[in-house]
Amino acid sequence: MTAPAQPTPFPVSPRTRARRMPERVSHIDAEVYRILDAAMLCHIAYVVEGQPYCTPTIHWRVGDRLYWHGSSASRMLRSQHDQLPVCLTVSHLDGLVLARCGFNHSVNYRAAMCFGTAAAVEDADEKARALHVMLERFYPGRDAALRPITPPELKATSVVGMTIDEASAKVRAKMNADHPEDISVPVWAGVVPVQTVIGEWQPCPHNVPDAHREGLESYAPGARLDEVFTRLAR
Amino acid sequence: MTAPAQPTPFPVSPRTRARRMPERVSHIDAEVYRILDAAMLCHIAYVVEGQPYCTPTIHWRVGDRLYWHGSSASRMLRSQHDQLPVCLTVSHLDGLVLARCGFNHSVNYRAAMCFGTAAAVEDADEKARALHVMLERFYPGRDAALRPITPPELKATSVVGMTIDEASAKVRAKMNADHPEDISVPVWAGVVPVQTVIGEWQPCPHNVPDAHREGLESYAPGARLDEVFTRLAR
């Protein structure tokens, strides 16, 4: 077992410096990773011929490297063979914050913005390894029980990797914050929490009775998805 | 009451044309709006000095116009006074799709990508109206009970509007899709559904016993957030 790494701040530039509410912002790697690792879905901003695109996709992390994948034919992945600057963002909506004036309404959230240069993983071995890591990260132990990936499938899949150059984490996790002079306004104030949870599994009708379920145990119906992903990322 | 508008496709260009899995893609406005209206959170891609940013924020819709807001000081809003091209994306993760080979693993999702040119709403009346519409969209009837917005608060808030020029909706909502020759692989296959639900309200300790709750009735603990937002958008 290796000792846990010391929390270290990412470098800060005008891209990631907090311009407002600095108390909500951190550049510490562990804070950024905590938000990334609690999610499967991210949104990636990139530019093709001057046009920004915002593409949702699945991501996974190995140290300070982020990975995502997709069909070799997709626009983003094709253009990213050219080493594109990207911003990869993960957000969690945690609650609606009701205040006594419109201005103080807010939401509770956790968001991580990561900046870097993305490039396709071209080496076949490295690509296969990355896809294995993706499966293991979400469903540990499952890959060994699956029908192995074929060379045409591997060829049809692109994997993109990006080392995080800079990143920021931004969190609001508190009650409503009304001005003292508004406290007497007689409206309900407080927080309406929001959680993403796992529902009842829908089995394929072709499943055999003793089908291999390794890697799925964590996804218990009713469990919080962000907590499951966090636990599995450790 | 006006008759509901005929579903109409947005124009299609290389930005929004489906390059793969065209069966998952629609350009019909009603399909795009259904995905947008089921969410509060969106992610916006925009470019400042060649650098793409992906910013999460709250959005709301009036016909084919999208709005978002924030502090007048924020980078995105400042740069958007210059009429920036943006891509605004809303995504819902609906389930994890477990297949019998790695290649056929997937997720169920709904995603809408909207392209347009964003500009700050400069007129004070229009800005105040847009902020009122935002509150009414999420909490109908609440704004009238709040302490009214002050001129300094209005000045400190930027509202950005964007007419949707092009958009696409992309949906996967089905079971695992294994190759017939993989059916005998004895792993559990199927869908693990994911839902975002409302938790137990956390009241401000200063609430009065008969505090005005209009606009909050829909947010019942246990209710699905996307269904509440959809209902309130009608």
Image (cartoon, coloured by chain):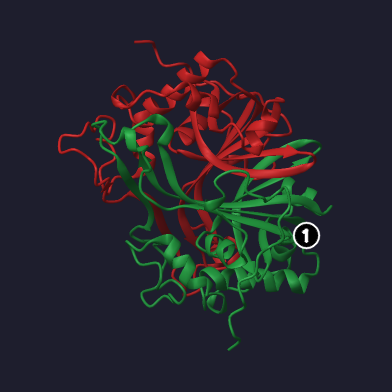
Chain colours: A red, B green
Above or below, B151 against B51 in this view is: below
Residue for point 71% across, 48% down: B15
Chain bearing tag 1 is B
Q: Residue furthest front?
A: B181
Q: Position of residue A27 (x, y in %)?
A: 59, 30
**Quadrant hosting residue B176:** top left
Q: Is residue A219 left or right of residue A59?
A: left
Label 1 crowd (10 A; few <14 / some 14-19 / many >=20): many
Q: Position of residue B207 (x, y in %)?
A: 41, 68
The answer to whether residue A157 of the structure is visible from this angle is: no
Mark 1: amino acid: Ala
Q: Position of residue B53 (x, y in %)?
A: 69, 40
Q: Which residue is mark 1?
A: B120
Above or below, A104 against B3 in this view is: above
Residue for point 35% across, 30% down: A232
Q: Residue furthest top?
A: A2
Secondary structure beneath label 1: strand
Quarter in which the N terminus of chain B is drawn: bottom right
The answer to whether residue A52 of the structure is visible from this angle is: yes
